[in-house]
Amino acid sequence: MQAKMTIQELLKRKRDKKKITMITAYDYPFAQIVDEAGIDVVLVGDSLGMVVQGLENTLPVTMDEMIYHTRMVSRAAKNALVIGDMPYLSYQISKEDAVRNGGRFLKEGGAQAVKLEGGREVAEAVEAMTRCEIPVMAHIGLTPQAIHRMGGYKVQGRTDEAAQRLVEDAKIMENAGAFALILEAIPADLAGQITGELSIPTIGIGGGPSCDGQVLVIHDVLGLFDRFVPKFVKKYANLKGDALSAVRKYKEEVESGVFPGKEHSF
């Protein structure tokens, strides 16, 4: 039987140069599939606002919604480490809010850690949470909660100044106590540099192959979400097409009287 993934094991993977696998999922059925596939980490992302709720961005997602989805995923994940994503304004206002809301993911959601976005500006929140035994994964580069400041979903760190700031933010997050760092939509060379300078694992999503691990959203992996498809996404299936065909077939059989047949009736 596979042992439950732990933060210490993730740190060991970094030292041993063994790649880390991570997938974002939002409910029991998909988290069960991810867990049975042997994925190391399941992130319950606030991207559920876009993928599940049909919103334009992640900003409206609430703490109660995140706890609800995290609880479902935690029930399914017997082996994977579960990380709850802290939504907009759940940690930015004060350290007290950060600790209180981070603690809810562990107490109510069943998660083993939380994730938040930002660099130096959230360092105090990371320090406060880790002091209270709330493990924190940090997230820099393209940070969706900052979409209005960034002017959209754009690659970050292209200039020397922006790249240097990301390197500094990565080190600040490590020093603040983060156990891992997501690098989203930054040049591969920069991600490789950051990965080489940190002792904590980096998880790439549009950060190139040099990161210590990779993360994608389950709906992207399975070809279920096509409202927009970032360059860094690779589809491993086309379940939307399969599902559409199946539902159309069901409609056709009901309308023609083929379903239900005798074998489906009592």
Image (cartoon, helix red, strand yellow):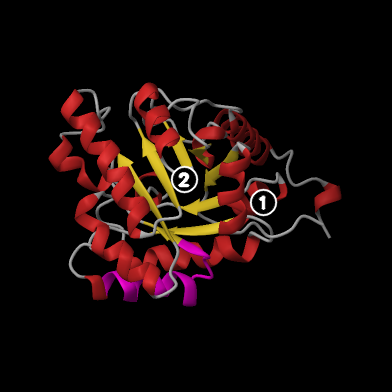
Specify the principal SS of the magenta part. helix
Q: Which residues are magenta?
A: 97-113
Give neighbour class at mark 2: few <14, some 14-19, many 20+ (Cα, 10 Å). Answer: some
Q: What amino acid does circle 1 point to?
A: Asp
Q: Quadrant of residue 265?
A: bottom right
**Mark 1 burial class by Cα count in 10 Å: few <14, some 14-19, many 20+:** many
Q: Secondary structure at mark 1?
A: helix
Which residue is label 2 attached to? 199
Q: Which disc, if any, is residue 104?
A: none
Q: Does residue 134 lie above or below 120 as drawn?
A: below
Q: Which residue is mark 1?
A: 35
- Which is nearer the N-term, disc 1 or disc 2? 1
Residue 66 x/y as whole percent? 40, 63
The secondary element bearing badge 2 is classed as loop
Amino acid type for the residue under numbered disc 2: Ser
Residue placed most toward the observer, 159 or 46: 159
CA distance for labels 1 and 2:
26 Å
Does the segment drawn in magenta span residue 78?
Answer: no
Q: Quadrant of residue 184?
A: top left
> Is 184 placed left or right of 163 in the picture?
right
Residue at the location (42% across, 52% down)?
45
Foreground: 31 or 127?
Answer: 127
Image position, residue 248 (x, y; %): 59, 33
> Marks 2 and 1: in contact by CB < 8 Å?
no
Residue 98 falls within the magenta-colored stretch: yes
